[in-house]
Amino acid sequence: MSQWKFVHAEAGDADRQEAWTEGLRSIFDYRDLGISAATGGDYVAHIIRANGRSQPDDVQQWHIHHCDFQFIQVLEGWAKFEYEGQGVHTIRKGDFVLQPPRIKHRELEISEDFAVLEIVAPANFETEVVEPPA
């Protein structure tokens, strides 16, 4: 932690198209908030927003993230997820989710205006498609 750097990600930067890039999923645009670089990869924080594309991908199947921490706050819209042992949850603007490490889950549906803040540790976590829960 002593090597972490100060970051100030300004809200106005979100208005610049170049602030948004492709990421894990082609149906979303990602805005990196600079946390990965500032923490030496200990954490990543980004805004993820639906971009209007519709394309099936692995995240709509049962999957896990190989991470130690994952926090999500819904900024706009809603999404429906199914979590192993927790059932189906619809998350809406203002809601947040703390996903335990490696919990099996899948996305069922999202709104056209869906956007979230996601914070994950470590920054370079992997996603793995897995068998459905028993």
Image (tube, rainbow, N blue to C red):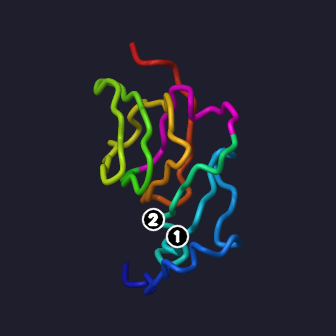
Q: Which mark is residue 43?
A: 2
Secondary structure at badge 2 equals loop
Quarter the N terminus occupies: bottom left
Give the class, few, some or many, for how many residues have Cα within 10 Å of label 1's Cα (few <14, many ≥20). many
* 73 over 9 or under it: above or below: above
Q: What residue does disc 1 label? A: 36
Q: Do the residues labelled 2 and 1 touch (CB within 8 Å)?
A: yes
* 90 over 126 or under it: above or below: above
> What range of the chain is rendered magenta?
54-67
Front in this rendered view, residue 108 or 125: 108
Residue located at (47% from left, 58% from top): 122
Give the Cα separation between the discs numbered 2 and 1. Answer: 5 Å
Secondary structure at badge 1 equals helix
Residue located at (65% from left, 54% from top): 23
* 45 over 23 or under it: above or below: below
User: In this figure, what is the number of numbered marks?
Assistant: 2
Front in this rendered view, residue 96 or 128: 96
On the image, the x and y values in percent for residue 18 come to: 71, 72
Going from N to C along the chain, the mark reached first, 2 or 1, is: 1
Residue located at (56% from left, 30% from top): 60
Specify the quadrant of the image occupied by residue 8.
bottom left
Q: Is residue 37 left or right of residue 117?
A: right
The reply to whether the magenta stretch includes residue 124 is no
Front in this rendered view, residue 56 or 42: 56
Q: Which mark is residue 79?
A: none
On the image, the x and y values in percent for residue 103 come to: 38, 34
On the image, the x and y values in percent for residue 69 come to: 37, 53
On the image, the x and y values in percent for residue 26 come to: 69, 46
Front in this rendered view, residue 32 or 114: 114
